[in-house]
């Protein structure tokens, strides 16, 4: 089995929405061969809770407006550390960068085929590492000023 045209349409729209809200490291996997409950997973992350929420809201709004899709389940809202949107055909995971590193969902699904995504979404690869490096440099500079 492979992801359906509907799943791919949902994934691409969700990936573009996440990219538009500056999500990091957007990637999608076709999990239809290993899971009977859904066709594909979309993973995205952000460096803070507010941005996680913003990405989730944008994905939800765009899928509803453009494709008439509403999630059957939404989990993880209160903490905004890891929000899951379940659309049956696809599941969108938006994680805080720390959760993304800790849970490493990519390791779990690395044997599944990666789905092609819009250019804007592909361009987000490596953004989390870039952000972490900049943050470390800023923290180190602040420490230097305090001394």
Image (cartoon, helix red, strand yellow):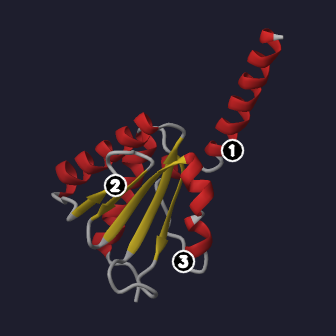
Marks 2 and 1, the one that precedes in the sequence: 2
From the viewer's perspective, is 102 left or right of 91?
A: right
* Frontmost residue, 105 versus 2: 105
From the viewer's perspective, is 69 left or right of 133?
A: left
Residue plotted at (61% across, 58% down): 102
The relative height of residue 108 versus residue 142 in the rendered view (above or below) is below
Marks 1 and 3, the one that precedes in the sequence: 3
Quadrant position of the C terminus in the picture: top right
Q: Secondary structure at mark 2?
A: helix
Discs 2/1, front? 1
Q: Is residue 124 visible?
A: no
Q: Is residue 135 visible?
A: yes
From the viewer's perspective, is 45 left or right of 87?
A: right
The relative height of residue 43 versus residue 33 in the rendered view (above or below) is above
Q: Secondary structure at mark 3?
A: loop
Disc 3: which residue: 113
Disc 2: which residue: 13
Determine which of the numbered discs, if any, sits on residue 65 in the image.
none
Where does the image place residue 30, in percent across and percent down from the top left?
A: 46, 76
Where does the image place residue 38, in percent across and percent down from the top left?
A: 34, 77
Where does the image place residue 80, in percent across and percent down from the top left?
A: 39, 45
The answer to which quarter of the image holds residue 11 is bottom left
Where does the image place residue 131, in percent across and percent down from the top left?
A: 65, 36
Q: How many residues crowd around disc 2 within 10 Å: few (fewer than 14), some, or many (20 or more)?
A: some
């Amino acid at each position: 089995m492979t992801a359906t045209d509907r799943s791919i349409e949902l994934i691409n729209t969700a990936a573009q929405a996440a990219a538009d809200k500056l999500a990091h490291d957007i990637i999608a996997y076709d999990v239809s061969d290993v899971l009977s409950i859904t066709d594909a997973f979309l993973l995205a992350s952000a460096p803070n809770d507010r941005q996680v929420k913003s990405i989730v809201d944008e994905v939800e709004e765009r899928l509803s407006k453009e494709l008439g899709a509403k999630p059957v389940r939404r989990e993880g809202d209160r903490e905004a550390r890891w929000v899951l949107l379940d659309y049956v055909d696809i599941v969108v995971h938006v994680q805080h960068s720390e959760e993304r590193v800790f849970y490493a969902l990519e390791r779990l699904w690395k044997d599944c085929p990666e789905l092609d995504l819009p250019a804007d979404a592909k361009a987000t690869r490596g953004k989390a590492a870039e952000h972490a490096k900049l943050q470390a440099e800023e923290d180190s500079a602040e420490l230097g000023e305090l001394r």
